[in-house]
Image: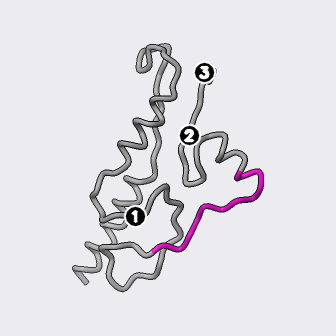
Amino acid sequence: MVYVQHADCLTALGDAVQTCAALCEDAVALRLTDVPDLDNEEPLPLALIEPLGTLGEARWMAHLHSLAARLPDLPWGTERYPIFFTSSKTLFEKSLMGRKNLQSTV
């Protein structure tokens, strides 16, 4: 059994408290966004913390550091204090790059 003692997030709606409040008020972070590096594509529904740069540009590390700075001082990464990190950015970029590569071969 796993007990979660601390959880936090950073979304397009803000930190955990801001995101929770926004979602309780039915806020939607998705916005139709033009994606650079994709020619002749329709805007995609994305929820972004900051404007989208070019593909392959790693801009999320600063956001990860700001999120980690708010963690309690515990031995994170050890057996009793595992870290779970999820992000859709990598999957999103891979899917876009796959679409771009597919278009260039057609």
Q: In the displayed structure, does residue 11 sit left or right of residue 63?
A: right
Residue flagged by tag 1: what amino acid is it?
Leu
Which image quadrant for residue 31?
bottom right
Q: Which residues are magenta?
A: 22-33
Q: Residue at x 27, y 58 (%)?
A: 56
Q: Is residue 78 above or below residue 61?
A: above
Pair 3/1: label in front: 1
Mark 3 or mark 1, earlier in chain = 3
At 60% from the left and 25% from the top, the residue drawn is 6
Tell me the quadrant of the picture where the N terminus can be found: top right
Determine the image quadrant of residue 99: bottom left
Q: Which residue is mark 1?
A: 52
Q: Quadrant of the C terminus?
A: bottom left
State whether residue 3 is above or below residue 20: above
**Can you tell which mark lies on residue 9?**
2
Nearer-N-terminus badge (2/3): 3
Q: In 3D space, how far apart are the residues under numbered discs 2 and 3 (Cα atoms)?
A: 19 Å
Q: Which residue is mark 3?
A: 2
Element assignment for label 1: loop
Q: CA distance from mark 1 to mark 2?
A: 19 Å
Q: Position of residue 2 (x, y in %)?
A: 60, 21
Amino acid type shown at disc 2 = Cys
Classify 10 Å Cα crowding around label 1: few (below 14), some (14-19), many (20 and above).
Answer: some
Secondary structure state at the residue bearing disc 2: loop
Position of residue 67 measured from the top left corner of the image (x, y, whole percent): 48, 36
Q: Residues within 10 Å of mark 2 (few under 14, many from 20)?
A: some
Residue toward you, 81 or 51 = 51
Label total for image: 3
